[in-house]
Amino acid sequence: MVYGHPAIAVPVTQVQAKAIVTANPRGTPGQVRVQAPNIDLDATLEELPQKDPLAAAIRGVLAELGIDRPPALTIRITSTIPLAAGLGSGAAVSVAAVRALSGFLGRPLPDERVSALAYVVEKIHHGTPSGIDNTVVTYARPVYFKRSSEMEGNPQIETLEVAKPFTIVIGDTGIPSPTAVTVGDVRKALQAEPMVYKQIFEAVEKIVRAGREAIENGHSEALGSLMDENQTLLREMGVSSAKLDMLVEAARAAGALGAKLSGGGRGGNMIAITDGEIAAEVARALEEAGATRTIITTVDKRR
């Protein structure tokens, strides 16, 4: 959530980004080669523009460690996370790159610095991001997150204790999720109708707080109902879409306890909470309703 209101996010471990750094003994000292086969990238750091997200992550690590001339190396980044789908693909890639590079250089960074550097890259991706993607990816646990209304300062981050495992089915609309555009549109709507959106944000905050209690007390059915309520409010905010609404309804009809859009909305993914026994059935229903991809993940005490 944005504008000083909280959000809850959980890690999706079935998809991930990976970064591997190797020394290049034959290379010129200071030369960093960046390879990302998923996006057909193979270039030196010098060849990449300042606003390139991968380059920004790498330069951020070097600046953080005070290294002007690193040993010649190659950093190769791969990802199985769908792009622009509300699953934090950019944040996952940044966190992987930051951790791999700082570790290779012998000075692994603590979680708070990893998240902070990834957030800088998130600004390139999304303009004014909430910071929740880089946070949940870094800590790899369910988190309760709240950032200041001005998007500055230290966010409130609390990891959540999962009292009872619950299963989430993710359905991909196949439509890119333009987070920066959506956030900008919501900001304009807020400026045009401040009282209306203030009431919506306050209602969402109550749902988030109740959702935290449901997770920490193992009440999956209550969590599902709260997700349904949240989806209604997100539609009122104008961040849902016909395809998202259709997948949400398909999940509910298949027996899901509740469902809502994920991420910036307008496209990307929706998520449904369900009993583990019928997760595959819910996934099939989503695919029959037009989901281009489904993912089943379980959130438990070990995450």
Image (cartoon, rainbow, N blue to C red):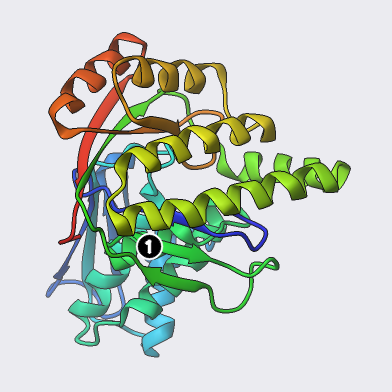
Q: Residue at x 23, y 44 (%)?
A: 166
Q: Residue at x 46, y 15 (%)?
A: 246
Q: Is residue 289 above or below residue 131?
A: above
Report the amino acid beneath label 1: Val
- Assign a secondary structure to mark 1: strand
Residue furthest to the right? 192
Percent position (x, y) of residue 142?
32, 59
Quick one: 285 or 62, which is closer to the camera? 285
Classify residue 126 as left or right of residue 38: right
Percent position (x, y) of residue 108?
24, 82
Q: Residue at x 64, y 67 (%)?
A: 151
Can I make out residue 80 in this image?
yes
Percent position (x, y) of residue 144?
43, 63
Which residue bears the numbered disc 1? Answer: 143
Percent position (x, y) of residue 26?
14, 72
Q: Is residue 95 above or below residue 11?
A: below
Crowd around label 1: few <14 · some 14–19 · many ≥20 (10 Å): many
